[in-house]
Amino acid sequence: MASAGAGPSGPVRSISQTGRSRTMGRMPTRAFTIRPDGSSGEDGVDIVEEELVPSSLAPIVPILRAANEIEEENPRVAYLCRFTAFEKAHHMDQNSSGRGVRQFKTYLLHRLEKDEHETKRSLATTDAREIQKFYAQYCRKYLEQDHDKRKPEEMARYYQIASVLYDVMKTVTPGKNEYDDYAKDIENEKASFSQYNILPLNISAREQPIMKIPEVIYLKFHLLCF
């Protein structure tokens, strides 16, 4: 990964709490957890990562949420999402001076060390191609197929995850790639869902898939006629 100091399919490097890059080491044998009060332990209790993010690191919440959403479909890409979240968290607070930041980064680092060895690629032989193929697969499945049958709030969630996946892809493979133009279109459509109950009434239905959703058509009719 570019900002982590290694190629996408080579040894994965992480940023330590001191700012030095190091290769992720041996997989820990016990589950490491962090408690809501900011303390940490190894009691093996299942947790929801996004609920444990310190307020100063709030921008990484969508990345962790996406990782949890796609975990079952592709554990390796979920790992890449968490790796990106860790990098962003480190750049936001390199000295881990914020409340609960050091404990959270330590938890996430342990999780990454574990997942690096346990997760396998299922679509390609490198992480770069894995995230690219999964991104295309995800967009086809959730944004293109049967989108007119989905609820607006569902589509909003899928667009958000697609946006995160693209950001992760750019972290793994910086520079121009074949999905850049497609991703721009996705971002333009995602804007229609910033609040899924606010309709782009001045844009044609052909350009905006949201306008084809039955509930949205009904609401648009009433907004324009009453």
Image: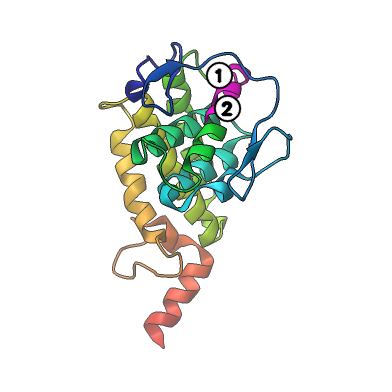
Q: Which residue is mark 2?
A: 110
Residue 105 image position (x, y, % from top left):
49, 35
* Spot occupied by residue 140 in the image (x, y as percentages of width and height): 48, 39
Q: Is residue 166 visible?
A: no
Figure quadrant of residue 13:
top left
Q: Does the stretch in magenta take in 63?
A: no
Residue range of the region highlighted in magenta in the rendering: 109-121
Q: Residue at x 61, y 22 (%)?
A: 114
Quick one: which residue is furthest to the bottom in this view?
A: 226
Asked if residue 86 shows in the view, the reply is: yes
Left/right placement of residue 48 relative to residue 134 reads right
Looking at the picture, how far across and down is residue 90, in whole percent?
A: 39, 35
- Is 120 left or right of 102, judged from the image as shown? right
Looking at marks 1 and 2 on the same chain, the residue that comes earlier in the sequence is marked by: 2
Classify 10 Å Cα crowding around label 1: few (below 14), some (14-19), many (20 and above): some
215 or 176: nearer the eye? 176
Q: Which mark is residue 29?
A: none
Q: Is residue 117 magenta?
A: yes
Q: Is residue 19 above or below residue 39?
A: above
Q: Please tell me whether mark 1 or mark 2 is closer to you in this view.
A: 2
Look at the numbered disc 2 and give the secondary structure of its residue: helix
What's the magenta bit mostly, secondary-structure-wise? helix
